[in-house]
Amino acid sequence: MRIRSSACARNLSGAILAAGLASVAGCGNITTIEPPTYQVNDVQAFKIYGAPSQIMMLEIHDRQSSVLPETWASALSGHGFPPRLDFITDATRTGPNQTLRDGYRVVVAVSPSQTTMNEKICTAPETTDYPADATKVPVRIAFCAGEKPISQLRANFVKDDFEQQVMRNGASIIIQLFPRDIPDDNDRGCGMVRPGC
């Protein structure tokens, strides 16, 4: 397995670029979502395997309780390529025909510590208090299979509009964590001239 973080992986579709990577220099009121990284070739297959009944756990780590876990779950649910997932934060809230696959979950770390990266996002995420005068709050989000991150990304949410920014960017986050496919880095036809690559 190799990490996919090239220009090809960043250009999964024109829609992602337009909706998800809202990084405009000098604009303090815009959420910035950095290009995702992948540890496997087929994130979609892991998504299906991890959530056989379209439900998945959402694990929130937020020392300052910036947004309720239920708000995160609502923001991330029902988006992306089919099968679309519904996220829950309480394992006892599954329906009669719903099955959670043990270990498969999305982890959110709001204001993560410097050590919360790579496998630490899945095994031991740590968060810190963000400064009172901060204008943006860093967030790490990962799709984890046990102790391994399958896909992950970093974002910076506007602190004064944090909850609304989470709600507005939920679809973009899910599309990037669970893309339909991940182009091959060696595909010479992949690049900015082919936004659907």
Image (cartoon, rainbow, N blue to C red):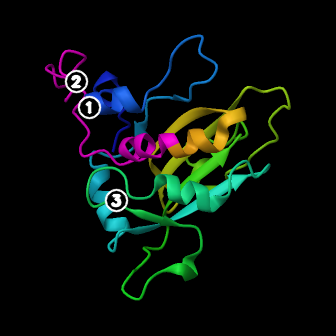
Whichever of callouts 3 and 2 sits on the residue coming sooner in the sequence is: 3
Residue at x 54%, y 80% (from the top left corner): 93
Mark 1 lies on a secondary structure that is: loop
Residue 5 visible, this angle: no
The location of residue 13, given as percent across then percent down, is 26, 31
In reply to whether residue 189 is colored magenta, the answer given is yes
> Which of the two residues, 189 or 66, is positioned nearer the viewer here?
66
Left or right placement of residue 39 versus residue 163 in this view:
left
Q: Which residue is identified by label 1?
A: 13
In three-dimensional space, the C-alpha distance between marks 2 and 1, rounded to whole angstroms, equals 5 Å
Whichever of callouts 2 and 1 sits on the residue coming sooner in the sequence is: 1
Q: Residue furthest left?
A: 189
Whether pointer 2 and pointer 1 mark residues with C-beta atoms closer than 8 Å, the reply is: yes
The location of residue 186, given as percent across then percent down, is 20, 25
The amino acid beneath tag 3 is Lys
Q: Which residues are magenta?
A: 168-197
In the rendered image, which quarter is residue 58 located in?
Answer: bottom right
Residue at x 33%, y 45% (from the top left corner): 1
Q: Which residue is identified by label 3?
A: 47
The location of residue 96, given as percent across then percent down, is 41, 89
In reply to whether residue 115 is colored magenta, the answer given is no
Magenta stretch secondary structure, dominant: loop
Mark 2 lies on a secondary structure that is: loop
In three-dimensional space, the C-alpha distance between marks 3 and 2, rounded to whole angstroms, equals 24 Å
The amino acid beneath tag 1 is Ser
Q: How many marks?
A: 3
Q: Which residue is identified by label 2?
A: 195
Residue at x 84%, y 31% (from the top left corner): 131
